[in-house]
Amino acid sequence: MNYFRVTVGPVDLATFRKTMQDVSCGAYVQFDGWVRDHNEGQKVLRLEYEVYEPLAVKEGERILAEAVEQFGVSKAAAIHRSGLMELSDIAVVVGVSSPHRDEAFEACRYIIDQVKVRLPIWKKEHYANGHAEWVNCQRCAQHK
Amino acid sequence: MNVTVRYFAAFREAVGVESETLPSKATTAGELFSECRGRHAALQDYHASMVAINDEMSQWESTIKDGDEVLFFPPVAGG
């Protein structure tokens, strides 16, 4: 069963991984997105995500279904954080299970790339100089 | 007709309100956005922004009707 969730609390990776297990699958690919301490030359102290959950979940599940359909993987799921986060926290996790590895890698890449450009999620970075700014991801979508 | 507009993230901070119900002559979401820019000078151009109507992702050319809830999303940055 594919699922896309939004959570305010920390992501429990062990539990997430367990939900992805499948005896018909020989490959599991997982992508974790972490909170980084810099962006565009600025020192980042922490950040916050604003998520419009009803549509983020709906569109997120659509992306997972597209990945399963296009790449023929068995299972795809993702969890995205909402609210305040500290450095090195897990902001997003994507998991894909599949009989073989090639399609699992491709599907995982597809999902995270689409999550970045399609979901109603916004990131505000708090900088060391006391400023805070909404990140305009037209640029960061180019950093892969 | 009357429509309800909701602003998110940078749009909400620019406008200073989370939502407003307003009379509109707009026929598309893009026209409605232009009307809102007329009301709120701080609202930036909708280039690279997205719009949803009644919780469905939509296009700027999508038709709006009386009672719709139109959501204006500034450029997104998930992940």
Image (cartoon, grey):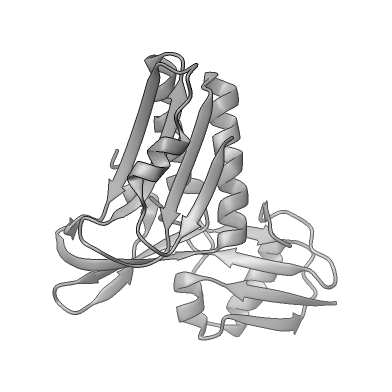
Q: Is residue B45 above or below residue A100?
A: below
Residue A123, picture quadrant: bottom left
Q: Is residue A11 above or below residue B31?
A: above
Q: Is residue A20 visible?
A: yes
Q: Is residue A7 above or below residue B22?
A: above
- Choose between A118 and A18: the one closer to the eye: A18
Q: How many marks?
A: 0
Q: Is residue B39 left or right of residue A126?
A: right
Q: Which quadrant, please, contains the C terminus of chain A?
A: top left
Q: Is residue B26 left or right of residue A4?
A: right
Q: Is residue B42 visible?
A: no
Q: Which quadrant, please, contains the N terminus of chain A?
A: top right
- Choose between B69 and B27: the one closer to the eye: B69
Q: Is residue A14 above or below residue A120?
A: above
Q: Residue at x 26, y 57 (%)?
A: A89
Residue A39 % position (x, y): 21, 57
Residue A142 % position (x, y): 33, 42
Q: Residue at x 28, y 42 (%)?
A: A143
Residue A138 % position (x, y): 39, 51
Residue B30 % position (x, y): 67, 62
- Choose between B14 and A106: the one closer to the eye: A106
Q: Residue at x 64, y 66 (%)?
A: B71
Q: Is residue A86 left or right of residue B3?
A: left
